[in-house]
Amino acid sequence: MTRSFNRALVVLALAVAACSKPEAPKPAAQHAPALPSDVQAVSAAATTAAAPSTDGMPTAAPAGQAAVPAVATANGDTIVATGEFVSPVRSELATKLPGRVASVYVDEGTRVSKGQPVLQLETDYVRLNLQRAEADTARAKAVADDAKKDLERKKGLIAKQSIPQATYDRSQSAYEQAVAAVQSASAQAQLLRQQLADATLRSPIDGVVAEKRTEVGQRLGDQNVTMVIVQTSPLKLRFRVPERYLASVKRGLTVRATADPYPNQVFEGKVTTLGGVVDSATRSFLVETEFANRDGRLLPGLFARVQIDMR
């Protein structure tokens, strides 16, 4: 009896000890180490850029970063856009004849006017050939004058039947051949004069030299582009506008543009062209504007910010 009672006490003590055993401590929550201060700014900028806007338009970039939205945005009655000035005319100049470059009169960035010489080919042999052709022409004219005088005499004699018809016919044929020789020599001289003129390459437009691809002494073929000249007045500026403004943007609307090189200057232009289709990817249409740029301060490739007042 006593032994059974003691055994029961031992079992009860073990049960109480098991119930009162303390629970294992839970592991502490793991936290990523704090980012360095210089990395935190980059992380915040990336998070802001990735967040979409509520109206589906690109969000503004954080302070200190350039923002170039693909499509214009609107603020009340004003459309704000960004774009790049482009030249409406780009001319690639090539010489009409092969030859060696004797002189180059311009460099990249040089402003040129229509008809201004920009390049000269060597013309020594052309000038010599022209002198010979002019001498041949003078000689042919002298022969033609003698043949004409002889034919006039033969006309008088044939009228009196003093010479046979065959003699008169030979005189007439000689005169006609002399006249043809004059025409041939004159045409050759004129061809060489044209080659002499074509040896001087001239600008076909008012503009600026964007590229110079040749130097003095270089041998040029018929298709070698020697330089590229772009028109700078007027200039065009293109950008895209959301489709909901299709009925609001009209040709002739005044636009104002600013560019970084001229922070306190506002340039005015006009809407000239509206895109004929709406881009299904961006739900926008193309707007093309024109700026007179008479002073030439704006250049092709220059970035600009544009405002269109629709009031």
Image (tube, helix red, strand yellow):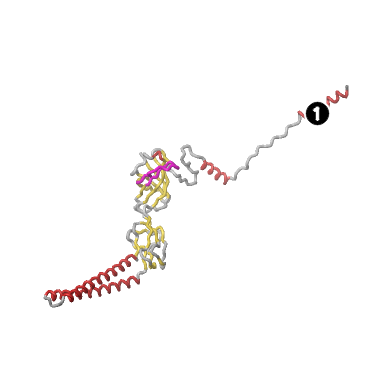
Q: Can you name the residue that lies furthest to the right here? A: 2
> Which residue type carries mark 1?
Leu
112 up-or-down from 164: above or below: above
Residue 182: where, in percent of width, then height?
A: 25, 71
Q: Quadrant of the N terminus?
A: top right
Q: Is residue 296 left or right of residue 25?
A: left
Q: Determine if the magenta segment contains residue 85.
A: no
Q: Is residue 146 above or below residue 92?
A: below
- Residue at the farthest bottom position: 162
| Residue nearer the viewer, 232 or 150 | 150
- Magenta-colored span: 272-288
Badge 1: how crowded within 10 Å, few (<14), some, or many (20+)?
few
Q: Quadrant of residue 18?
A: top right
Q: Looking at the picture, does residue 59 appear above or below residue 119?
A: above
Per the image, the residue denoted by label 1 is: 14
Please name the residue shown 36% across and 56% down the image.
Answer: 207
- Place residue 213 in its image quadrant: bottom left
The answer to whether 25 appears left or right of 221 in the picture is right
**Residue 158 picture location, percent across and down:** 14, 75
Asked whether 285 falls inside the magenta stretch, the response is yes
Position of residue 160 relative to residue 277, above or below, is below
Q: Quadrant of the C terminus?
A: top left
Residue drawn at 39 percent across, 60 percent down:
227
View extreme (left): residue: 160
Give x and y (percent) for residue 284: 42, 42
- State the SS at label 1: helix
Residue 22 image-quadrant placement: top right
Q: Position of residue 43 (x, y in %)?
A: 56, 44
- Residue furthest to the top: 1
